[in-house]
Amino acid sequence: MPDPSADSSSAQGMPGSISAAALPPPAQLWPSLVAIYRAQLSRARVARIPLLFVATFQSVGIMILMRGVVDGGSEAQSVVAGSSVLVVAFVALNLLAQHFGQLRATRGLDYYATLPVPPAAVVLGVAGAYASFTVPGTILTAAFGCVLFGLPLTNLWILLVVIPMAGAALSGLGAAFGLLASRPETATLLGQLGMSAALLAGVLPPDRMPEIVRLVRNLLPSTYGVEAYARTFTGHPDWALVAANLAVCAGVGVFLLTVSTWAYRRASIR
């Protein structure tokens, strides 16, 4: 007589049997984020040089124009810091809004929806790839501005902290613009308006602005990255205030990236 236990054990070992152990583990956030980041970085590698040239040339040109108006002191610090962060705004805010707007219009989000990755990994991976393009241009702009206005280069290293903090906030805002806009033209318009606001409120010295413009300036996430970098030009920087500005920038970045992740979920199911 055949042994029922043998049949049971052989059935469990059949290739067609389904068991909990055979199911793949759920995708983790960090490995998924790294994979999407690398894919986006390699895909956009061809456009890296034009992006860097346009963003850097724009900020350098603004500083050269402002050199005839601003002599030095705190105003020069604001101009150099604002122009440096403007490179981040051009790519992370303006171009990312256009990118996600085009993806939504052409149903390119359907490709990401089929990937077994968390939605946060898609937003963070794409945003991180775009923000990475700004590192050489931002450092080059800051170094040129320091030489142009006679500012010290000692604390140029702070940009390695300012760039990811400001980049996260501006990338989150740009991604939200692109994912929430009903048309790609609207996403492009919002990205251009956001970059213009970062230009006017970030590069121009705040002491010369009307009160209403100062209020708008305080609402921009890039302002706190500008303030953090501008306060490092003095002989004895207030590092506690620099850290506080960076903390605000990081907090706003987390909030905006959370909003953009929600916007991605909303756009991908439509």
Image (tube, rainbow, N blue to C red):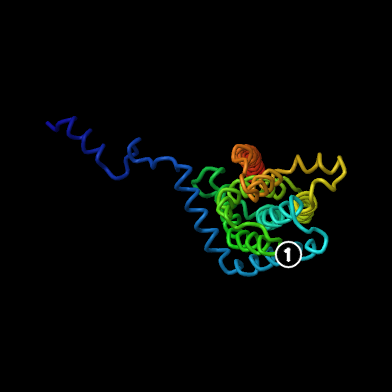
| Quadrant assignment for the C terminus | top right
- Which residue is nearer to you in this view: 72 or 2? 72
**Does residue 143 appear left or right of residue 208 in this picture?**
left
| Residue type marked 1 | Gln
CA neighbours of label 1 inside 10 A, class few (<14), some (14 to 19), many (20+): some
Residue 24 pos. (x, y %) = 39, 42
* Count of numbered badges drawn on the protein: 1
Image point (51%, 58%), residue name:
39
201 shown above or below 136: above
Residue 266 pos. (x, y %) = 66, 41
Asked which secondary structure carries label 1, the reply is helix
Determine the residue located farthest toward the front in the rendered image.
235
**Does residue 66 appear left or right of residue 2 in this picture?**
right
Determine the residue located farthest toward the left in the rendered image.
1
**Does residue 253 appear left or right of residue 115 in this picture?**
right
For the question of whether residue 111 can be seen, the reply is no
- Which residue is nearer to you in this view: 97 or 18? 97
147 shown above or below 256: below
| Quadrant assignment for the N terminus | top left
Image point (70%, 50%), residue name:
178
- Which residue is nearer to you in this view: 223 or 178? 223
Location of mark 1 (residue) = 58
Image point (73%, 51%), residue name:
78
Residue 68 pos. (x, y %) = 81, 64
For the question of whether residue 18 can be seen, the reply is yes
Residue 105 pos. (x, y %) = 71, 54
- Which residue is nearer to you in this view: 202 or 5? 202
159 shown above or below 265: below
